[in-house]
Every structure is written in C-alpha cells, then in structure tokens.
Amino acid sequence: DVKVTQSSRYLVKRTGEKVFLECVQDMDHENMFWYRQDPGLGLRLIYFSYDVKMKEKGDIPEGYSVSREKKERFSLILESASTNQTSMYLCASATGTGSYEQYFGPGTRLTVT
Amino acid sequence: AQSVTQPDIHITVSEGASLELRCNYSYGATPYLFWYVQSPGQGLQLLLKYFSGDTLVQGIKGFEAEFKRSQSSFNLRKPSVHWSDAAEYFCAVVPRGYKLSFGAGTTVTVRA
C-alpha cells in the first residue's frame, strides 16, 4: 500500500514563527502536492512538485514556499506564520504516468495564535 | 469561471437508505473525474474515478457514480448506507495536467 506520512497531526505556532511541515511518501512517486483544507472551500492547491528540486505554484501560493531535495520528501514552509494560515494541511503524492490518482496523508492541523 | 460544484453542503440519511451526492463541473472538455471520501481525522481516500468508456463506474465500499456529459454531472450513489459511511465526500476533476480541482465537499450524517 502507498503510504504518505506527515510529520505532525497537530501543531500550534505563534504569529511570525517560521513553520515547517514535512511530508514523506514511500512509493517512488514523481509528483507531490500540498493543499490546505478549509470548511466550505474544499481543498485548495498551494504548491506541487513534479520532480526533485522542481516546483510549481498552485492556486494559493502566497505566504508559502516549498522544498523538495529528495524524491520522497516534500516540505511546506510558512516563512512568517499568520493567523489566517490556521488550517488543515494535506500532502499528496501521485505517479507521473498519467493515472492522476493522488494518495493523501492524514493531514496536519495547524493553529497560529 | 471553471469550477466544480457540490450543491449539497450537508446530507442526513437513515442507515439502510439510499444516498446520492451531486457533482457538477464547468469545463470546456470532459475532464477526468474523481470522488474521494474523508473520514473524521483522516486523509482523503479515492472511491472511484472516470476517465472514459462506460459512464457508470463502480468503486470501493459499494459506491458507484454515473457520468452524464449532457448535464456535466458526476453523481455518486450508494443503494444502502452503513453508519461507517458518515464522512465528508469530495468531487474532484483534472481539467489539465496533474492538478486536481476539488468541490467544497458534502458532509454525510447517518442516523440510526
């Protein structure tokens, strides 16, 4: 089974802190994604990566950056956390061969106070 | 604007009753279509997908979905719900590339 793990299930940070969310997948997938999930808005794509060191902005990249130094690991970085970044963050991975099926991690619920 | 619409925010259904969740999309060409389920405290799990061919698609957990091109719809159905089907359901499309676009979700409550 594909497994996507996220470093924390719950995280509480203060405004202005730098926050790292880590995601690891064990299926050698080329594509990895970061979403945020908010009630009534569904999932919105923040960034995705289609290869090591390659990234592309999603629909809501402002205030976020990403890093992919190894194929299995994709990090989301909040350079200076703000209260409007309080949300559920979901990581996903997918093969690069057109199946389009994404496998999701359990999510990290981030609260910024 | 291109979008995925799930008209029902919340549906309550009795255990054993049938369930239908609606999904409409507004893209020029037929996109790839998906339904995902998110149980409380968990990530999303793929229920089923439609790329082409037979417009009635069977998925896991007894779910099925029907693609109707004329209505730009991809509705999810289950003939008899179980208490474990209480969850949030998301319709998603891939209009281009690998990027999924999600609907806002429908929360399903199952009453005994």
Image: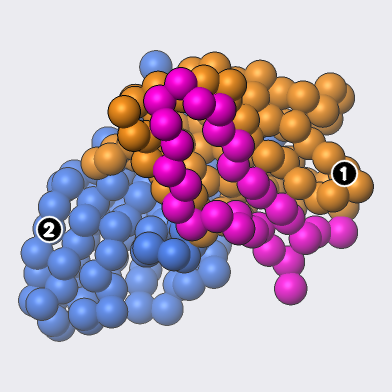
Chain colours: A blue, B orange
* Amino acid marked by disc 1: Arg
Query: Relative to A58, is B52 above or below?
Result: above
Query: Relative to A82, is A70 above or below?
Result: above
Position of B107 with respect to A58 (left or right) is: left
Query: Relative to A34, is B77 above or below?
Result: above
Q: Callout 1: residue from which chain?
A: B
Residue B6, given in percent of the width and then of the height, sits at 60, 55
Which segment is the magenta one?
B1-28
Q: Residue at x 46, y 21 (%)?
A: B16
Of A12 and B50, the residue lying toward us: B50
Residue B17, given in percent of the width and then of the height, sits at 50, 26
Of A10 and A55, the residue lying toward us: A10
Q: Residue at x 35, y 50 (%)?
A: A90
Residue B58, given in percent of the width and then of the height, sits at 66, 19
Q: Secondary structure at mark 2?
A: strand
Q: Judge the density around disc 2: few (<14), some (14-19), many (≥20) Cα neighbours within 10 Å.
A: some
Of A28 and B78, the residue lying toward us: B78
Which mark is in front, 1 or 2? 1
Disc 2 marks which residue? A11
* Amino acid marked by disc 2: Leu
